[in-house]
Amino acid sequence: GESVGLHLPTLSVQEGDNSIINCAYSNSASDYFIWYKQESGKGPQFIIDIRSNMDKRQGQRVTVLLNKTVKHLSLQIAATQPGDSAVYLCAENIQDQGGKLIFGQGTELSVKP
Amino acid sequence: KAGVTQTPRYLIKTRGQQVTLSCSPISGHRSVSWYQQTPGQGLQFLFEYFSETQRNKGNFPGRFSGRQFSNSRSEMNVSTLELGDSALYLCASSRTGGNEKLFFGSGTQLSVL
């Protein structure tokens, strides 16, 4: 079936460190990418997005990098905090497919105080 | 502004029964998408509705169906429930559904016994 990203790995970091979460996508026709944060028992929460005409986009404490050559997406979280502990999901939107997102399996981020 | 609202929050059904889940999008949003989330398969796209019309459909059997009303509220129905239908069903809305962030509800946790 369609899929993007890795089979749920776990990333453990120390509070205050920077975190980097990676994601591989599969479709060259994808032109929009989103990162979501999902906490236990909740729906995915939007973090940051990037369009295919960009390589980098920054938000508050987060940066998304897009490498279209190798179909790779990454999310960098600066000064990681315990409240950042969650599952992080990358998603791609294929051009002209409306509101259909293809999600990766996600990465579980654990922040140690 | 109220977020995406899904009801009910939890459901327990038995095999062979049918179920209807409801989703109220953010005011002004005309696109509603449905996703199934399981530990093994992650988040998978079910279908998208825009202006009462199904615009996209994922790879799910015909037992899964949906509809959208003139006020953009949406329902999804699963008939002849199977054990494997146990999952978190998430609804997401956006203004137009094309290359823009989707806002998710908290989901309906369906357990099929």
Image (cartoon, helix red, strand yellow):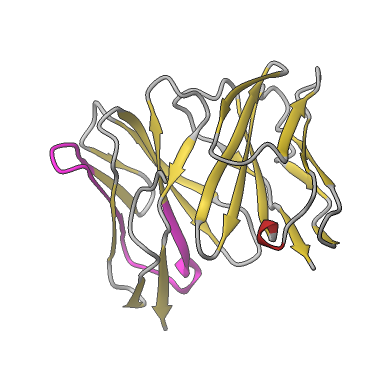
Across and down, in percent, residue A109 comes to 40, 70
Across and down, in percent, residue A110 comes to 42, 75
Q: Is residue B89 above or below residue A99?
A: below
Residue situated furthest left in the rendering:
A69
Q: Quadrant of the N terminus of chain B?
A: top right
A44 sits left or right of B90 in the view: left
A90 sits left or right of A38 in the view: left
Across and down, in percent, residue A40 comes to 60, 67
- State yes or no: residue A74 in magenta: yes
Across and down, in percent, residue B8 comes to 84, 52
Q: Quadrant of residue B75?
A: top right
Residue occupying the point 21% across, 42% down: A71
Q: Is residue B57 above or below residue B63?
A: above
Q: Quadrant of the C terminus of chain B?
A: bottom right
Residue occupying the point 55% across, 50% down: A45
Q: Which residues are magenta?
A: A66-89
Q: Is residue A88 above or below residue B46?
A: below
- State yes or no: residue B111 in magenta: no
Q: Quadrant of residue A51?
A: top left
Residue occupying the point 61% across, 50% down: B36
Q: How many marks?
A: 0
